[in-house]
Amino acid sequence: MTPSIIRFRPLTFYKSPLELRASLRTRHFLHSFAIELICDMQIMSRSLAPARPLLNSLWKQPARPCRRLLSSQSSQARRPTAASQTASPRHQPLMQRRFKYKTVEEAKSRYRSGPFSWKAGLLFIATGAGLLYYFEREKGRMQRKRVADSNKGVGRPQVGGPFELIDQNGKTMTQEDLKGKYSLVYFGFTHCPDICPEELDKMATMFDIVEAERPGAVLPVFVTCDPARDGPGILKEYLSEFHPRFIGLTGTYDQIKAMCKAYRVYFSTPTEVKPGQDYLVDHSIYFYLMDPEGDFVEALGRQHSPQHAAKIILDHMKDWKGQLRT
């Protein structure tokens, strides 16, 4: 193909200058394409010139049949005999796998269920439930540890400390007597009309739940905020109405004030009280959970039910790594 054989219509045939301009552009493009094509063909002919003798020699050789094709045809023509089948036992497992199912219904049911079965489903559910239980348990443990550590952190007021008071039996009791076990400390007074009796009933329920699972692991302590009226005898009679294992502590006003200050407990007694006149004492309403080393763990308020509070105490006991005093 040469540029000379490309034919175009005469110039007089075009009706408008735009059509003529488009034809000239097409003519220029075809001429350039023809010239490039001729140049490429010349370059290819020059590059193939040294290989022409080799191509001619290969072209003149007679055609030979493909040995692979003949060997495959001959192998297909051979039929296996009984002796060859018995001599090659390695093909028997293939036959067994081929006829694994006895009936067509068994094969259909297998293909219908796919790779998943009820055993795989049960294993998946059991694994998921186990992982969920583990992560929930670890999450609760880390939350309890964070609460306990935050109460012991730097910059926070320390709750708890040394004290020396008298119990309901007239014996001296200090903070060392509470160590080795968990202690649940509540502050109140015996003449309280409603709140203290409700909280002591709640404390008795909490103590019974914890005592059922961990006998002797917690000490229930009641500290009076009204030492002027709550002596050892009054405490013994009052606490026996709620639980026989309760420990009541009393002392002088300064001793009670020092312990309330150490435990961050607010209490207020009237200043101008006549002898024999009844009065109320305003105080904080919390149960202070202390660990066996005498450190503050957590405060349980009125928003906690006895069951929930007992569970919190038991969970903290499970997290404790040391030994409890018997």
Image (spheres, rainbow, N blue to C red):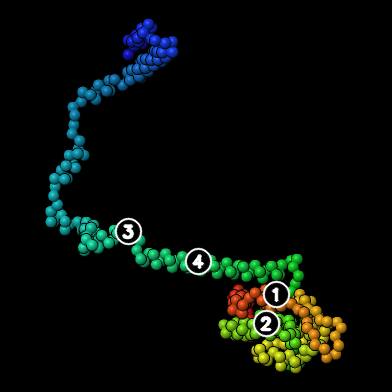
Could you give the CA–CA distance between mark 3 and mark 1, rounded to whole angstroms? 58 Å
Residue hosting label 1: 296
Q: Are marks 2 and 4 in contact (CB under 8 Å)?
A: no
Q: Quadrant of the C terminus?
A: bottom right
| Vertical position of residue 141 compared to residue 174: above or below | above
Nearest the eye: 53 or 319: 319
Give x and y (percent) for residue 35: 38, 14
Residue type at mark 4 is Leu
Q: Secondary structure at mark 2?
A: helix
Percent x, y for residue 239?
69, 89
In the image, is residue 137 above or below residue 278?
A: above
Residue denoted by label 3: 114
Distance, label 3 to label 2, CA atoms, is 61 Å
The part of the image, by quadrant, that contains residue 86 is bottom left
Q: Which residue is at a point 70% across and 77% down the rendered structure image?
A: 286
Identify the secondary structure beneath mark 3: loop
Q: With respect to residue 141, does 3 lie above or below?
A: above
Task: Give the mark, 3 or 2, whose residue is nearer the N terminus.
Answer: 3
| CA separation in Å, label 2 and label 4 | 36 Å
Name the quadrant containing residue 182.
bottom right
